[in-house]
Image (cartoon, rainbow, N blue to C red):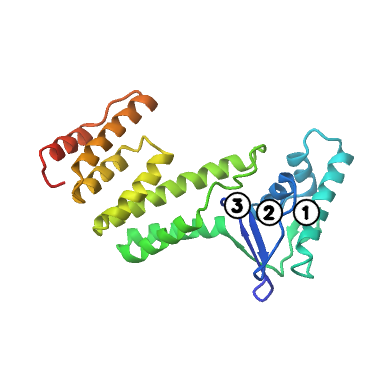
Amino acid sequence: MGQDGPVLAVHLLGTFRAAVDDVPIEPWRGGRTRSFFAYLLTHRQPWPTRDMLMDLFWPGATPQAARNSLNVAVHTLRRAFRAATDRPVIEFGANAYRLNPALRLWLDADEFEQLVGDGQRLETAGDFENATRRYETAAWLYRGGFLADVRHEEWPVLLRERLRLTNLEVLDRLGDRYFEAGRYAAAAELCTRLLHQDPCRERVHRRLMRCHSRQGYPHLALLQHRACTAALRAELGVSPSPATQELYERIRRHETV
């Protein structure tokens, strides 16, 4: 993208938002147009051809009807952005649609993955302080599922799930960092958020039990063991591991964990 042009900022994690140089774009009606725009933003190398887009978004239509629908979607996008910039946002050339190269794109999904990758590299290098900052920013950026309000199309499914799992990994790593730093309340809050989405993460149950115990709430730790047992049996048909059972017994004996 250009280095001196307007900044196109788009949020696809959670509620859809778009702006050009901080001028918000009024949301347009129709999830198909929003989905089409998101596809362009996330499939930039190479840019999708007209035929590819017609087959993907209007697979059951005749070629003429699919082309008309594509033209309507592009027209809707161009009209929506006209109030924020006099530059065309969507261009067509060499049988492919693309963003205007004069625009500088900031995409929350790209930023999220960049932050996670930076955090992992810093953590591997032993720079836990800066790794924690990257994970915190990534967790803040993840406001919800990718294109959360577009549920009727197949193309976002794999990307949505990959980003969801990446966010769970961020919460897990960040919880580890908080626990190691003695920030037990913050670690417990992250454990709770993570288990709400994935109740079978036994290691996270153990971390939450330790957080409760270290905050002086052993009864909550024992209740968490019960929640862990119930989740594992209901979802996987298994019992807690020996490590979890040993932690439970140590807490019952009021040992430091």
- Amino acid on which disc 2 is placed: Pro
Indicate which disc residue 46 carries: 2
Q: Position of residue 206 (x, y in %)?
A: 26, 41
226 w.r.t. 142: above or below: above
Q: Nearer the viewer, residue 137 or 68?
A: 137
State if disc 3 and disc 2 touch (CB < 8 Å): no
Q: Position of residue 26 (x, y in %)?
A: 72, 59
Disc 3 element: loop
At label 2, counting other C-alpha atoms closer than 10 Å, the crowd grade (few under 14, some 14-19, many 20 or more) is: few
The residue lying at 55 percent from left, 46 percent from top is 145
Q: CA distance from mark 3 to mark 1?
A: 28 Å
Tell whether 38 sits left or right of 136: right
Q: Which residue is mark 3?
A: 15
Mark 1 or mark 2, which is nearer the start of the sequence?
2
Q: CA distance from mark 2 to mark 1?
A: 9 Å
From this viewpoint, which residue is outermost toward the top? 237
Q: Position of residue 134 (x, y in %)?
A: 42, 62
Q: CA distance from mark 2 to mark 3?
A: 27 Å
Indicate which disc residue 104 carries: none
Disc 2 element: loop
Displayed quadrant of residue 185: bottom left
State if disc 1 and disc 2 touch (CB < 8 Å): yes
- Amino acid on which disc 3 is placed: Thr
150 w.r.t. 100: above or below: above
Q: Which residue is mark 1?
A: 96
Q: Position of residue 31 (x, y in %)?
A: 71, 45
At label 1, counting other C-alpha atoms closer than 10 Å, the crowd grade (few under 14, some 14-19, many 20 or more) is: some
The residue lying at 26 percent from left, 54 percent from top is 184
108 w.r.t. 104: above or below: above
